[in-house]
Amino acid sequence: MSNEVKANTKPTAADAAKLEEQKKAKSEASKRWKEKKQQQAAERVESAKAMIGRLEKSGIFAKLDPVDQAFLKGLAEPKSAAASGNTGLFAVIFPNAKVGDSITLDEVFAKTLKGKSNLDHYVKKWAEKGIIVEYKENKADIRKSTYSIVKM
């Protein structure tokens, strides 16, 4: 057995074509898989709605445990990604936001585990969208500094 090291060779046109063909096949397979998953999810929603309709019509749905009712309703009405906990930082910091709402830096840290520099970055992004959040520093205790909504 020889331990020859393969010399640095440039890929040929045939190798490049084969690689492109593999990438294309993989991309198409991924696309088909996503479409199949979306179709299955839509079918589950329709089946759950039909089941709830049949159970309500027969009077059985009202007799079910509230937990079971909630489960079936959850199947029939899936939540979007935004509603399932993937909410923006602004909504986490200022739930039901309105002009005049304020929060201390300490509260922001407790809610989000984000520090002042990270929050200042988001304040600039929100300003680009027309949401003006003002920072008022507390010299005695920086953690008691506040962020207040000035304009939305």
Image (tube, helix red, strand yellow):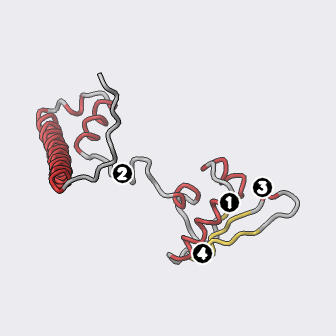
- Identify the amino acid type marked 2: Ala
Q: CA distance from mark 2 to mark 4?
A: 26 Å
Q: Position of residue 123 (x, y in %)?
A: 60, 68
Q: Earlier in the sequence, mark 1 or mark 2?
A: 2
Q: Specify the quadrant of the image occupied by residue 41.
A: top left
State which quarter of the image contains the N terminus.
top left
State which quarter of the image contains the C terminus.
bottom right
Q: CA distance from mark 3 to mark 4?
A: 21 Å
Q: Determine whether the residue tagged by mark 2 lies in a helix, strand or loop.
A: loop
Circle 3 sits on which residue? 143
Q: Position of residue 94 (x, y in %)?
A: 57, 60
- Name above or below for residue 114 compared with residue 36: below
Q: Earlier in the sequence, mark 3 or mark 4?
A: 4
Circle 4 sits on which residue? 132
Q: CA distance from mark 2 to mark 3?
A: 32 Å
Q: Earlier in the sequence, mark 2 or mark 4?
A: 2
Q: Residue at x 19, y 43 (%)?
A: 37
Q: Earlier in the sequence, mark 2 or mark 3?
A: 2
| Residue 108 shown left or right of residue 30 in the figure | right
Circle 2 sits on which residue? 81
- Identify the amino acid type marked 4: Ile
| Label drawn at residue 103 | 1
